[in-house]
């Protein structure tokens, strides 16, 4: 069930990026490649792009990844499910706190600024924690946050009419696509808080379901 869990987490990446790019003023809090590109646009003075939100997202993401490293080391030789549950609880809590703060955010005016920055920091930290955790699982083609190498593999590894892990790779692409589409619809029709709240619920709910899999009892080894 681990690949299924990671596909669901991929969908939450789309939800979070929809909330951040469309609701927080052109900043990614899950995709740091896009964030660095946006930061380059801002540095060049391109209208509509700002330096501070992108820098804040990058810093928060790195702090979250640092925390994930410590969490993983604290769970070495313990049950995989226990480690992933702790990561999921922290991520979901951060996303839900961000959703509560987002209730007061006026998306059109990008105000109040403190609330906008708080949501960026919280979601950036949550996604850094997630990315570093999934990275240590080392499941091919399921990073849950980026698709460049996955899409490259679909085309580059095509030999004899077949592509290795084709279903998994396509699933990852479709999951993030679906998450982004649903996130955009929720934001447009229900506000900034909805996609963040849903992302938190999926993260925690999917992880709890994974705990029923015997694989969750296997000791975590780096």
Image (cartoon, rainbow, N blue to C red):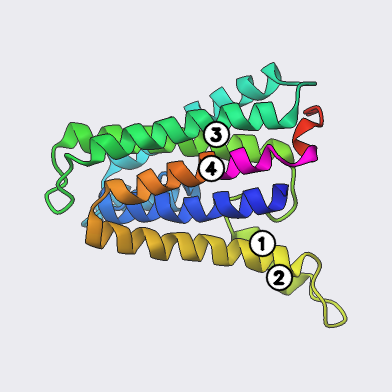
Does residue 105 appear to the left or right of 120 in the view shown?
Answer: left
Return the mark for residue 220: none
Tag 3 or tag 1, which sits nearer the N-term? 3
> Which SS type dominates the magenta stretch?
helix
What residue sits right under mark 2 in the picture? 154
Residue drawn at the location 18% of the way across and 42% of the way down: 105
Horizontal side of 218 relative to 60 (left or right) equals right
Q: Spot the residue most to the bottom.
A: 161
Q: Secondary structure at mark 1?
A: helix
> Which residue lies at the image location 55% right of the left edge and 38% below the top edge?
130
Label 4 with label 1: CB-CB less than 8 Å: no
Whichever of callouts 4 and 2 sits on the residue coming sooner in the sequence is 2
Labels 4 and 1: the sequence-earlier one: 1
How far apart are the two marked residues, 4 and 1, measured between alpha carbons?
26 Å
**N-term-proximal mark, 2 vs 3:** 3
Which residue is labeled 1 in the image?
150
Gap between marks 3 and 4 measured at Cα: 9 Å
Neighbourhood count class around disc 1 (C-alpha, 10 Å): few under 14, some 14–19, many 20 upward: many
Instruction: Describe the element under mark 4 as helix, strand or loop.
Output: helix
User: Is residue 75 rendered to the left or right of residue 7?
Assistant: right
Left or right relative to 221: residue 115: left
Camera-near label (1 vs 3) is 3
Q: In which quarter of the view is residue 149 placed?
A: bottom right
Circle 3 sits on which residue? 88
Which tag is nearer the camera, tag 4 or tag 2?
4
Q: Residue at horizontal 48%, vertical 26%?
A: 63
Instruction: Quote the CA–CA distance across marks 4 and 2.
Output: 30 Å
Mark sitting on residue 205: 4
104 or 81: which is nearer to us? 81
């Amino acid at each position: 069930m681990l690949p299924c869990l990671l596909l669901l987490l991929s969908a939450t990446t789309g939800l979070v990026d929809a909330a951040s790019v469309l609701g927080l003023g052109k900043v990614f809090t899950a995709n740091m490649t896009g964030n660095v590109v946006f930061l380059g646009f801002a540095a060049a003075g391109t209208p509509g792009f700002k330096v501070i939100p992108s820098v804040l997202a990058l810093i928060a993401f790195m702090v979250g990844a640092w925390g994930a490293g410590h969490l993983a080391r604290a769970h070495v030789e313990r049950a995989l499910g226990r480690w992933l549950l702790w990561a999921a609880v922290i991520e979901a809590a951060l996303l839900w706190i961000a959703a509560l703060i987002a209730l007061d955010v006026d998306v059109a005016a990008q105000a109040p600024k403190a609330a906008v920055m708080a949501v960026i920091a919280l979601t950036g930290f949550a996604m850094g924690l997630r990315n570093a955790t999934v990275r240590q699982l080392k499941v091919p083609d399921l990073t849950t946050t980026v698709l460049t190498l996955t899409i490259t593999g679909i085309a580059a590894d095509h030999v004899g009419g077949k592509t290795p892990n084709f279903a998994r790779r396509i699933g990852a692409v479709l999951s993030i696509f679906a998450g982004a589409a649903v996130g955009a619809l929720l934001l447009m029709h229900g506000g900034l808080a909805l996609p963040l709240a849903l992302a938190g619920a999926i993260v925690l709910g999917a992880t709890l379901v994974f705990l029923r899999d015997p694989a969750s009892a296997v000791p975590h080894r780096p």
